Structures are given as C-alpha cells and as structure tokens.
Amino acid sequence: MTNWLPDLSSGSGPLYQRLADSIESDIDKGVIDAGAKLPPQRDLAYDIGTTVGTIGRAYQLLRERGLVSGEVGRGTYVLGQRAEAPKPDLELGLQGTRPIDAPSGKLRFDSTAAPDVGQGAVIADILARTAQEHPHDISSYTRDFPERWYEAGSRWLSRNSFRPSLDSIVPTLGTHAAVMAAIAALTMPGDYVVFEHLTYSQIARSAGLIGRRTALVSADEDGIDPDDFERVCAQKHPKVMFLMPTAKNPTLVTLSAERRQAIARIAREYNVALIEDDLYGELTDDPTPLLAEYAPERTIVAGGLSKSVAAGVRGGWLSCPPAYRHRIRVAHKMMTGGLPFLLAEVGTRLVISGQAGEIRKRCIAEIQARLAIVRDVLKGFDFKARDNVPFVWLTLPDPWLSGTFKNACLAQGVLIDDEDEFKAGRSGQVFHGVRFGVSQPRQSRDVAGGVAVIRRLLDEGRAGYDSFS
C-alpha cells in the first residue's frame, strides 16, 4: 500500500504497541482494507524514524491479535473480517454495552464468570414475565419453594449417569452459598474441614470466618493423594472434605475413577462427608462418574449457573442425602437471609425452558475460540488448558515467582491470579504457577492482547520487569 503512515500522536506505552494500536484502529475504520499489504518493515522504520526491530514487534503483536498474516519473502497482509460464532436456533439478542473491564482500565483475566454471549436479552424477557406473573411473590419473603425449583436443580446437576432425585435438591443463592450452607450444617465451630493445598480458597476462608479449622491434604499431578487423605482423617478427624474432582480450580486436574473410589472408601471408613463442587465439571464432557456415584450416602454435589450461563443470576443448587436436606436448607437461610424469589425463579425458568442449555453451548463455543488463541500464543510454554473450561494454569519458567509475575502483569494492565490466591491455608508447598481466565474480556482481540502481554513477559524474563520503575 502507498501514501499511508500511522498516527502515533496519541496513545501510551512503548512505540511498537502504539504502532500496532494505530494500525488496528485504521483496519477497524476501513482506512486499511482487508487483503492490503502493510509497508515493508525497513521502509516503515525509515518513514517514522525508528528501528526495524520496533516495526517487527508491532507486526508480531498484530499477528497475535489475529489481524494480519505474514509470510517470509511475501510480506505482511491484513486478514479479512473474522467470522462470528454460529448462532443457535434460539435468538439471544445483541451483546450488552456495559464495559466489563475494571474501572481502572485493567484487563480482567482474574475472573471466570460466563462470557457475554447476549444472554442479557433472554434474562430480560424472563424477568419481565416473572414480574408480571408473580408480583406478590416478588414483594414478599420466600417461604415456600415450588416443586419446579427442585426440578430445575435436578436437571442442572444431572451429569453422566448421575440423576439426583427431587427430594435431594436444595435451591441456593449460587454455588458458594450452597457449599457454605453444607459446611455450616454438618460441622460445628472447631471442627476440621479438609482442603487441598491449592483449591477454590474462598470456601476455606469463609469456613474460617464461622470458626471451622482447615486441614490440608496433599495432591500430585493426578489429584488428591488418597494415602495422605487417610493420614489426615486419622490424625485430624475431620467432618467434611471440599473438593473439585473434575477440572479443579486452578490446576485443571481431574481425578481418575480409581482415586474417586479410594476417596469414597476412606471417607466411609472415617465418617467424613464429601462436598463435590461440579461447577466446572458442568462445562466438560468428562465421562468419569461423579464422586456421588461412589459414595451417595455422604456426598453433596453443588453446581450453578455462574460459569456457564450468567454469574449475575446467582442460580445454584445442591443435591444431598435426604437426611441432610432440612438442615442444609435452614443453614442456607440463616447464612444468606433467604432465597430471593425473583432470582430463584429466573434460574429455574432458564433451566426448564432449555435456554440455559443453549446459552451454555454458546459460552462453550466462545471459550473454545479464546482458548485457541492462548494455545497459539503460548506455544512452547508449560501451561494447562482444558476444552470448554475458561481458565489456564501457567507454570512459570525460572526465574519468575508467582507473585512477581502477577505484579508484572498488573503493571502492563492485565489482572491475573497468583498461586497464593488459591492456597486454602498456610502451606509450605510452592507451585510457581499463575491462573488467568479468558471469559471476561469483551472481545477475542482483548484476549489476544492480554495473552500477548503474558507471552512478552515470559520471553523477557524478570529483566523485563522493574517494580521500581
């Protein structure tokens, strides 16, 4: 192309980043057409007074964003418009307009809530119809739960051959509230609750606030070590263990059937209740039987809508042995103040109508597209990503430390979580890992830009980050 020069008078950051942003802006505006050849790196470097290396970094960043392709000897060309994900028969409406990024302008890689695929339009319609049909229920406290709320929970928690009965279901204000209600109902202050060293630590912290103590169990690359679980049971006499057998947060480990059987046997021997958080399992096609199938008399399964439909709905359910049901329902009310009719009804209608399932399909398609970007950009580094699951566990190369890398990403405008965020207690184990989610940025190009920051930091090592600059 001729007679084109980038506008570098605005923006912030290093020159190569401003150059890439300027080219991207001109592509969006149609100033640079799809299929156009960008100026040779040496020519553009001369025109704007910089080095060929700077131009090369800018062009590489554009490739990582999926905007251009380059071939040795032929040059760099602008790609056509990226195809949108196919829409299911259910029309979900347009994307919302509210910015999802943090108010500070940071890119949110520290959340794994369901991506925005237009579910707001569906939810708005359900909200309007619920308000019209149940004005009295909305204006009052919820005292009686209709049977359809239990039916929705049974449907949503069903996976593989696990089919919970209606008399096992407790509707809850999200999965976190479901787990905490179970812990509160089945333990007393001072009792031990077992957690892995790395897990969804918000549960361990919440349990500590109500006086429960934490017992840590070791795990290896295959998940919880049954021998160490037995040791903890013999020494600490815990009442409950919290675990995520499928696609565990943050390491993505899935327990084998053999380990699930061993854990069920040990829990039965030492009379330990098991809380199986299947929130990410709901997104997978993993065929391994749920832990509840090996120990149905003592396993509580918790799940909800936050990762696969809409976190703001706060829809959740748990399935438990019928003998636990009344205690857990009362504990849930005491700890949350009660279940709002409006949220419970919206979650129920989403599930029973089949719309939750359709939204989940679209969320999975979007997550898959974003994971493809991660796998391409981080090729060659040690990371774990699992189909359909909206986060990545990255093992850092030497000499990076988890907290230092998190701060380096923050300095570049990307929010991620270091390993300490997932430690259930004071642990001497060091994992040298970070977790980042891909579901919250508004567009795939934002994901590409954030992952490019991570890649650049990995390439540069700690020499590329100065906490005092």
Image: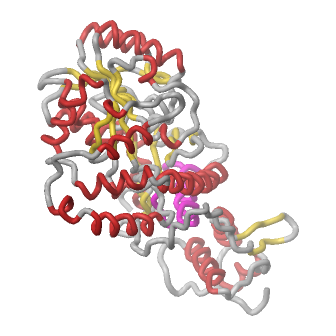
Residue 432 visible, this angle: no
Residue 452 falls within the magenta-colored stretch: yes
427 relative to 13, above or below: above
| Residue at far right of view | 73
| Residue at far bottom of view | 3
| Relative depth, front residue between 265 and 64 | 265
| Relative depth, front residue between 56 and 32 | 32
Residues in magenta, as a range = 439-462
Quarter location, residue 47? bottom right
Residue 55 falls within the magenta-colored stretch: no
The residue shown at (33%, 28%) is 300
The quarter of the picture where the C terminus appears is: bottom left
The quarter of the picture where the N terminus appears is: bottom right
Residue 151 visible, this angle: yes
The image shows residue 346 at horizontal and vertical percentages of: 34, 57
User: For the image shown, how many numbered marks are present on the structure?
Assistant: 0
The residue shown at (57%, 41%) is 386
- The overriding secondary structure of the stretch rendered in magenta is helix
